[in-house]
């Protein structure tokens, strides 16, 4: 199968200041894409942008909180002004959590949905005409938790499941408009995400509860998901736990529940 050709293609990458997003930005830069990168932390974002420029890419940045509608509008306008239309939107920015639902503050549920779901969906709405002009692609970074609900991740799992519902439907609506929609479901990835996981009261947990276990690297994830997006695949699953959890949820859901319950007891 022919490999991806991102040379000259314009892309927005959200959550580019860290982890999977920064790896996706670097891979696209290396392939000659023209980028708009966004994240909240200016310094970290500029560091990633600097590395992308060293690889020869044209890069514009916008440090902002994507839960603000005005920030999303500014981002869409920036991409339109600089590159005209859009070839690729990577909806990657997200936060996770670590708390039982019975203890979770209602505001934390909403915070997680605002960034993981609404920010991705509303940014997509804004750039849809720009993507349509280029028969472009949307890449959504979901999770194994978007396929299987896992304890202590209720709000996170719900936000990721919601992404599947919306983007699966959008893929069908956009069939005749030439826009591809790829949803990626990695298992554990070695990034700082779990350090920033929200606890029941919304404070960051400050440590990685999965440290020491085998994980995918952000670069492995980037390679797989960009390739899948290029080929307009619908779904891409990565990591042993993703395959196992998905298979068990279909053929032995009771066993999966017992395993998950034991793991979080
Ligand atoms: N790591 C894993 O094990 C794993 C597994 C499956 C799926 N995923 C998914 O992969 C995606 C990327 O996560 P990661 O692992 O790379 O985590 P990460 O290193 O913590 O990166 C998260 C990114 O999202 C940005 N972000 C968070 N809240 C934001 C907001 N309100 N507005 C704008 N940007 C915001 C962060 O910006 P700042 O840092 O500048 O605030 C950062 O760039 C997420 O959607 C996550 O759910 C991760």
Image: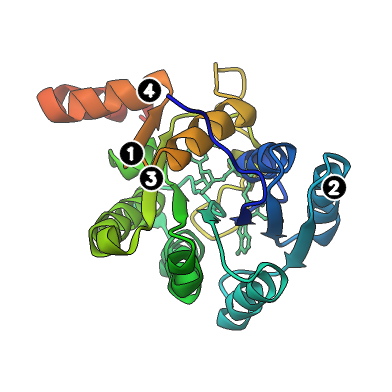
Q: Position of residue 78 (x, y in %)?
A: 69, 74
Callout 4 touching callout 2 (CB < 8 Å): no
Q: Position of residue 110 (x, y in %)?
A: 43, 68
Where is mark 1, residue-wise?
A: 235
The residue labelled by disc 2 is 53
Q: Which mark is residue 68?
A: none
- Residue under label 4, please give it: 241
Q: CA distance from mark 2 to mark 1?
A: 31 Å
Query: Residue shown at 62%/33% (left/top)?
Result: 208
Image position of 217 (left or right of 262): right
Q: Is mark 4 within 8 Å of ligand 1?
A: no
Q: Are marks 1 and 3 in contact (CB under 8 Å)?
A: yes
Q: Which residue is mark 3?
A: 183
Marks 4 and 1 sit apart, C-alpha to C-alpha, by 16 Å
Query: Around disc 3, counting alpha carbons within 10 Å, would you say few (fewer than 14), some (14 to 19), or many (20 or more)?
Result: many
Q: CA distance from mark 2 to mark 3?
A: 28 Å
């Amino acid at each position: 199968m022919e490999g991806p050709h991102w040379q000259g293609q314009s892309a927005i990458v959200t959550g580019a200041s860290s982890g999977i997003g920064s790896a996706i930005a670097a891979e696209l830069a290396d392939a000659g894409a023209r980028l708009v990168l966004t994240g909240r932390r200016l310094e970290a974002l500029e560091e990633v942008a600097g590395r992308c420029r060293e690889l020869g890419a044209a890069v514009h940045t916008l440090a902002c909180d994507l839960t603000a509608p005005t920030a999303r509008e500014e981002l869409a306008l920036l991409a339109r002004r600089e590159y005209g239309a859009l070839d690729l939107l990577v909806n990657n920015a997200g936060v996770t959590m670590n708390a039982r639902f019975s203890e979770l503050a209602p505001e934390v549920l909403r915070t997680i949905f605002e960034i993981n779901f609404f920010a991705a969906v509303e940014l997509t709405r804004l750039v849809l005409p720009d993507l349509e002009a280029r028969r472009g692609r949307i890449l959504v970074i979901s999770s194994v938790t978007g396929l299987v609900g896992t304890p202590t991740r209720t709000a996170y799992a719900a936000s990721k499941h919601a992404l599947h519902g919306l983007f699966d439907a959008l893929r069908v609506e956009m069939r005749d408009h030439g826009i591809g929609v790829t949803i990626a479901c990695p298992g554990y990835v070695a990034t700082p995400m779990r350090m920033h996981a929200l606890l029941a009261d919304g404070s960051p947990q400050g440590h990685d509860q999965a440290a020491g276990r085998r994980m995918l690297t952000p670069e492995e994830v980037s390679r797989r998901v960009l390739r899948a997006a290029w080929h307009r695949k619908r779904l891409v699953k990565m990591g042993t736990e993703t395959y196992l959890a998905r298979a068990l949820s279909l053929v032995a859901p009771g066993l999966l529940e017992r395993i998950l319950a034991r793991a979080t007891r």
